[in-house]
Amino acid sequence: MIRPSLRIASAFAGLLIIAAAATSKSELRYLTVAVSCMGGLFLLPLFASWRAPRIEEFEFLSEWVGRLRTVMVVCWGAAFYLYMSVLTAQSARTEALEQLASLGAAFWTVGLISLFFTAYFNSRRTALIREHMDNLG
């Protein structure tokens, strides 16, 4: 598990990055947003669970890992299908293609966000398995 001092230091670093991005005089708004998002990633350890997983949670964690993996595959498959549809469309309206591309980007984003939740639940499940195996051996 992550020590509380490391969690707080990570959150402080994230706040500093966000503050630096917010006070910058950059003309590139996209760069400012990207740097702020990176700072937000440093805040995530602060919100993760502070206690070790219990053996009773193994089924719950396994179910959520399976669900989120399915969400990732479906969303990325739909995004890939939509992008291929947009790329191969030759005589379609430009507005319709832009809407399909935006829908594909939305699917890709949902798949990407579910990747982080999958990693979180899977890390807790793996910690539980390692702890249980250490107790057995």
Image: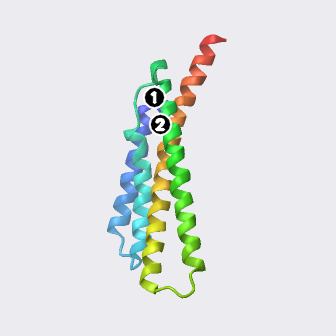
How much space separates mark 1 and mark 2, taking CA atoms?
A: 6 Å
- Circle 1 residue: 60
Q: How many marks?
A: 2
Q: What residue lies at 47% left-to-right and 49% top-to-bottom?
A: 114
Q: Is residue 128 left or right of residue 46?
A: right
Q: Disc number at residue 4?
A: none
Spot occupied by residue 102 in the image (x, y as percentages of width and height): 44, 71
Q: Is residue 86 left or right of residue 33?
A: right
Q: Is residue 136 above or below residue 19?
A: above
Mark 1 is on which residue type? Phe
Q: Secondary structure at mark 1?
A: helix
Spot occupied by residue 34 in the image (x, y as percentages of width and height): 44, 65
Spot occupied by residue 96 in the image (x, y as percentages of width and height): 43, 80
Q: Specify the quadrant that holds the C terminus.
A: top right
Marks 1,2: beta carbons within 8 A:
yes
Spot occupied by residue 41 in the image (x, y as percentages of width and height): 44, 51
